Structure formats: structure tokens, C-alpha cells
Image (cartoon, rainbow, N blue to C red):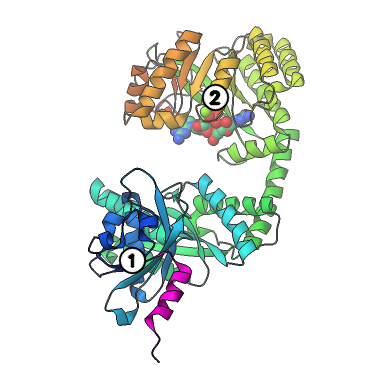
């Protein structure tokens, strides 16, 4: 059957603004359609050029992976790619590609105008959760069948150790391109850390084939020891949007925690059921923790950088059952209005401990939600009155996990605590949107700079500028500064240089059941050298 070319063209333009043909060596051999409007170049200017010059540098790994993945007769895309532009105006196109066997290796691409993407990299977990939930809603409305694919790139970390940083970076770039090229719209893939990745894609292909293709795109040989494993969760559920969101988060969290060791749910409905079960168990544990005070406290040292790293105080951190981070439970306690009794129970035990150990100084965390409670302040006052031995050595860290609703009230309460002899510290400064407003409106003794800045500061760059200026500003306000998550001598050196007063982190000791023992000289404990907590004698 012979069909007139214009009829075929009609079909092509029904789906696209611009048609491009690429030769196997990556040159544009044919351009037809609204080239000027889409790319800013006339059709004739495009012909003969390499596609690499036509695509924004940040999206080249994505485009490369898309083209490389065509070999097995699959259609690639659609993915949104940004196009290289000269005048700074960002243009983007949704692009699909296909390699018809009869076309001698030529690749046919169709492109239509699209909204530019917000990122050209793999998402982090939080952004990916939002992308996935949005895609779930769209899929529900349009009937597209999507799945959440979880990919564990076993052996990648080992390869990092074997290769030069440049060689490994090239592989990471290829991997990022490959995962994005496989994902829905080219913008729904995430790096979850520890060799674990996730992406949303259309259903219809086995996870095994996905891993095979990724491996091929990475161009690795079996001797490189990288063995990806994948599982897929069909994104189908009739549950409420909030429940689906929690189920997505739950599935990602269990994958991050246990990798492929834990059996993945087959559908989001199953994930919803699992996450509901888990939430109910957690609520039970939380209820127990609050009513039966079923939790324990661990203590992490904070040192004084301006006094030979002597021990200044310990931060008190709560633990439920296992030694895992209490953060998810704290968030849940905030959501379920259980945080105030929990904070109070922690403070009560902290005061008991202080009353029994005259050399200790302890800082308890309190949620932004708790600080506006008058009952809480009254309870702290009466507990201190009952244990006068503890007065002067109790401190508070105000966490930002729940935004403070009434700033003026919060400040009055903080002042009431200071009047009782408690120093107050603002936790995680710089992590939340409201940090500056807090600093402006609350009277504080110490500002604790969020760990994310500290972990980066040793590499120089913008973080050290930020910290230097923050220290200066706090100095003007008469507030001391504390750096958390100091993990290496380099980080310590950097924060010391920036003028930070106190430091906390694995370099000085992880949180442990028993606080460090102060020296016989009393007061501040002068540590002879920086040592890990395990090597330091403990206070029995
Ligand atoms: P936070 O108050 O900012 O506590 C610091 C967190 O960083 C702790 O995590 C600690 O274990 C961890 N950390 C300490 N040094 C290092 C380091 O060098 N590197 C790294 N990567 N991490 C380090 P944890 O114990 O999981 O606590 C998480 C959060 O949970 C706390 O953050 C705090 O916001 C909240 N929290 C803990 N206990 C309580 C409590 O009793 N009440 C309230 N309201 N919140 C609490
Ligand atoms: Mg804290
Ligand atoms: Mg903190």
C-alpha cells in the first residue's frame, strides 16, 4: 500500500509542532515545522547541527539516555527537555523519539512546546513525594496507568571507591539521565541516597527489563559489580488523597530503610493498608510513651569552642523503643496534639537527672507547639520549685518542626523560662522559612545553626559566608551561636574560624545513654584532645 507523504505528515503534525530526524552520529538531518517558535532557530539553521548544541547542557544526559534506550524498538519519551537558548529565555519541548528499523538507524523525533521544568536533576525525597502525589492525581483523572518503581543500584557505592572522582561523576550523570529518561515526562525520578532511587513511569514493562536497560545505559561490564534490582508499585488506589500521600511516603521510607529486603507492596492500595497499620502501631507506641512514660533519654555533648573544647552541656534526645531517630514520631505527636505531654514528660525526667547529678547541665527540646502553652510553663515552674537543686542547669531548645502560631506569646513564655534560670536556644536555625522572624521576635541566649550548613561548610563556598554573617548578626544581638552536626576536624576548624561559640556532633560524641563525666576540676570539662565518645569515660 502506498500512502501519500502529506497524509503521513498530517498525522505527525497532529501530535507535534516540530519534526526532527537525527542521524546515528547525532546530527540533525531534517527539521520541519514550527522551528522558529519552538527553538528560536529556522529549520534550515538546524539541519547539519549536532543535537547536543540544540539541547540545554543540563538535559543532555537525559536526552542521551533517551536516544541510547531506543535500540530495542521502544518509543522513548515523551520527556520535557530544555532547549539551548542564547538570549537567556528558557524554552522547553516535550519530545518523543522512535527508531524505525527501515530507516537505517535514523531517529525520528517529534516535539511540541512545553512548560520549562523546575529541575534538571534527580529530585530529593521530599520533592519526589510531591511530584508522585501530583502524578497520582493526574493519572486518576486521565486514566494513564502509572507505577512507582523502586530501584536499588547494588554495588554502586563499591564502584565509587574503585574509580576516580571524575569517572564516577560521569557514571552518576549517566544514571541520572537514564532514570529521568525512563520516568514519566522525564521529570519524575529521585535519588533517595545509599544507592536507592525511585521513579514514576507508565506501567507495562517488568522491573527486570527496567534494570537491564539502566545497566546497558550505564555502559558497565559485569566485572564492575553493579547489580540493580527493581520493584514496582502500581499507582492505583481509591483511598483519600491524604492517605495516598502517606502511603507513598511510607513506601519510600521503608525502601530507604530496608531496601529490597522488605517485600514491596504490589499496589498503592496495599501500601495504604500497610501504612495505616503502621500508623496505628505508632500511635499505640506514642500513646504508651506519653501515658506510661515509655521512652528513654540519650545525651549528646556540646563543647565550648572558645574554652579549649570543654564540655558545656548535653542535649537531651528522646528514644522510643529502638535507637532510631524519634523525628517521625515527634511529627506525629505534633499532628495528634500529643507533643505537649511528651515534652513535659521529657523535661520532668531531665529535671530529675539534673537534681541527681550536680555537675550536669542539660538542654531539653521543646516543640514550637508546646512553647505557646501556659500550662507547660506553669508545670516547668512548679517542677523546678520542687527540685531546687536543678535550678540554673536546665536549658531549652526550641525546635522549628511545628511553626509557632503566636510569636508574642511564645516570647513571653521564653522570658518566663529565662527568669527561672533556664537558657533558651533556637534549634535548627536556617532550616525553616521562619528562622529570621524567630530571631527578630524572640529573646534568646543561643542560636543553633542547622546541621545542613555545617556539613557543607568544610567545602568552603556559600555556607561559610552565611555562617560568618549569622555569627556577626548574633553577636550584635548578644546571642551566642552553636554549630550542630560537626563531624570532622575540618568542619570544626571552619566553624571555629567563622567565630561560632559552641559545637556538637559526632566529632565530640554521638548521643549515648550516659552523659560524659565532667573532670574533677568541676564545671567545664576540659577535654585533652578531640576523641570519640566511646573512648571517653562515662559518668556512671
Ligand atoms: P535536633 O534537636 O536538631 O537534634 C539533633 C539531631 O542530629 C539528633 O537526631 C542527633 O542524633 C543528630 N546528630 C547529632 N550529631 C550529629 C552529627 O554529627 N551528624 C549527624 N548527621 N547527625 C547528628 P535525633 O536524635 O534523631 O533527633 C531528631 C530530632 O527530633 C531533633 O533534632 C529534635 O527536633 C527532635 N527531638 C528529639 N527529642 C525530642 C524531644 O524530647 N522533644 C521534642 N519536641 N523534639 C525532640
Ligand atoms: Mg535540638
Ligand atoms: Mg538541630
Q: Does mark 1 have its CB less than 8 Å from ligand 1?
A: no
Q: Nearer the viewer, residue 347 or 265?
A: 265
Could you tell me which secondary element the residue under label 2 belongs to?
helix
Is residue 530 something that shows in the picture? no
The image quarter in which residue 498 lies: top left
**Residue 194, horizontal then vertical, whole percent:** 42, 49
Q: Quadrant of residue 501?
A: top left
Examine the structure image and report whether residue 452 is included in the region drawn in magenta. Answer: no
Neighbor class of circle 2 (other Cα within 10 Å; few <14, some 14-19, many 20+) is some
Viewer-proximal residue, 169 or 384?
A: 169
Quadrant location of ligand 1? top right
Relative vertical location of residue 70 with respect to residue 429 in this rendering, above or below: below
Q: Residue furthest bottom?
A: 1
Q: Which mark is residue 67?
A: 1
Circle nearer the viewer, 1 or 2: 1
**Nearest to the observer: residue 83 or residue 417:** 83
| Label 1 to label 2: alpha-carbon separation | 45 Å
Relative side of 291 to 112, left or right: right
Report which residue position mark 2 lands on: 435
Do we see residue 114 in this rendering? yes
For the point 30% across and 56% down, the residue is: 54
Q: Position of residue 149 (x, y in %)?
A: 50, 61
The reply to whether the C-beta atoms of the residues labelled 1 and 2 are less than 8 Å apart is no
Mark 2 CB within 8 Å of ligand 3:
no
Q: Which mark is residue 207?
A: none
* Secondary element type, mark 1: helix
Give me the residue at 55% from left, 50% from top: 129
Measured as percent of width and height from the top left, residue 140 is found at: 64, 62
Q: Which residues are magenta?
A: 1-20
Asked if the stretch drawn in magenta spans residue 19, the answer is: yes
Amino acid at each position: 500500500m502506498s500512502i501519500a507523504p502529506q497524509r503521513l505528515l498530517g498525522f505527525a503534525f497532529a501530535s507535534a509542532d516540530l519534526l526532527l530526524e537525527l542521524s546515528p552520529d547525532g546530527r540533525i538531518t531534517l527539521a520541519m515545522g514550527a522551528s522558529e517558535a519552538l527553538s528560536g532557530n529556522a529549520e534550515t539553521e538546524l539541519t547539519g547541527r549536532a543535537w547536543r548544541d540544540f539541547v540545554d547542557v543540563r538535559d543532555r544526559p537525559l536526552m542521551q539516555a533517551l536516544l541510547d534506550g531506543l535500540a530495542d524498538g521502544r518509543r522513548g519519551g515523551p520527556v520535557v527537555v530544555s532547549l539551548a537558548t542564547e538570549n537567556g529565555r528558557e524554552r522547553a519541548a516535550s519530545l518523543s523519539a522512535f527508531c524505525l528499523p527501515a530507516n537505517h538507524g535514523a531517529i525520528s523525533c517529534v516535539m511540541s512546546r512545553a512548560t520549562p521544568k523546575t529541575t534538571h536533576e534527580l529530585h530529593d525525597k521530599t520533592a519526589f513525594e510531591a511530584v508522585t502525589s501530583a502524578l497520582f492525581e493526574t493519572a486518576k483523572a486521565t486514566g494513564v496507568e502509572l507505577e512507582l518503581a523502586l530501584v536499588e543500584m547494588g554495588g554502586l557505592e563499591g564502584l565509587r571507591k574503585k574509580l576516580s572522582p571524575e569517572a564516577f561523576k560521569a557514571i552518576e550523570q549517566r544514571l541520572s539521565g537514564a532514570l529521568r529518561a525512563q520516568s514519566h515526562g522525564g521529570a519524575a525520578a529521585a535519588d533517595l541516597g545509599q544507592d536507592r532511587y525511585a521513579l514514576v513511569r507508565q506501567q507495562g514493562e517488568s522491573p527486570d527489563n527496567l534494570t537491564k536497560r539502566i545497566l546497558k545505559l550505564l555502559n558497565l561490564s559485569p566485572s564492575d559489580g553493579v547489580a540493580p534490582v527493581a520493584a514496582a508499585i502500581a499507582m492505583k488506589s481509591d483511598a483519600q488523597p491524604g492517605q495516598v500521600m502517606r502511603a507513598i511516603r511510607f513506601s519510600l521510607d521503608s525502601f530507604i530503610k530496608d531496601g529490597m529486603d522488605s517485600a514491596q507492596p504490589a499496589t498503592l492500595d496495599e501500601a495504604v493498608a500497610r501504612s495505616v497499620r503502621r500508623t496505628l502501631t505508632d500511635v499505640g507506641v506514642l500513646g504508651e510513651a506519653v501515658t506510661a512514660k515509655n521512652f528513654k533519654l540519650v545525651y549528646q555533648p556540646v563543647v565550648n569552642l572558645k574554652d579549649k573544647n570543654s564540655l558545656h552541656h548535653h542535649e537531651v534526645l528522646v528514644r522510643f523503643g529502638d535507637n532510631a531517630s524519634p523525628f517521625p514520631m515527634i511529627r506525629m505527636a505534633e499532628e495528634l496534639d500529643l507533643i505537649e505531654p511528651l515534652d513535659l514528660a521529657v523535661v520532668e525526667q531531665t529535671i530529675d537527672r539534673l537534681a541527681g547529678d550536680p555537675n550536669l547541665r542539660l538542654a531539653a527540646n521543646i516543640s514550637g507547639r508546646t512553647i505557646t502553652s501556659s500550662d507547660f510553663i506553669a508545670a516547668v515552674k512548679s517542677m523546678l520549685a520542687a527540685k531546687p537543686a536543678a535550678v540554673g542547669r536546665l536549658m531549652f531548645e526550641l525546635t522549628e518542626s511545628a511553626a509557632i502560631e503566636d510569636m508574642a506569646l511564645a516570647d513571653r513564655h521564653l522570658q518566663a523560662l529565662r527568669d527561672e534560670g533556664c537558657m533558651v536556644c533556637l534549634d535548627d536555625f536556617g532550616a525553616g522559612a521562619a528562622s529570621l522572624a524567630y530571631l527578630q521576635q524572640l529573646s534568646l541566649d543561643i542560636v543553633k545553626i542547622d546541621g545542613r550548613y555545617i556539613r557543607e561548610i568544610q567545602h568552603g563556598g556559600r555556607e561559610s559566608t552565611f555562617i560568618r554573617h549569622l555569627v556577626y548578626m548574633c553577636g550584635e544581638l548578644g546571642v551566642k551561636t552553636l554549630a550542630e552536626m560537626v563531624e570532622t576536624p575540618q568542619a570544626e576548624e571552619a566553624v571555629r574560624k567563622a567565630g561560632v561559640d559552641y559545637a556538637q556532633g559526632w566529632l565530640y560524641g554521638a548521643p549515648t545513654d550516659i552523659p560524659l563525666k565532667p573532670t574533677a576540676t568541676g564545671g567545664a570539662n576540659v577535654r585533652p584532645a578531640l576523641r570519640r565518645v566511646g573512648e571517653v569515660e562515662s559518668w556512671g
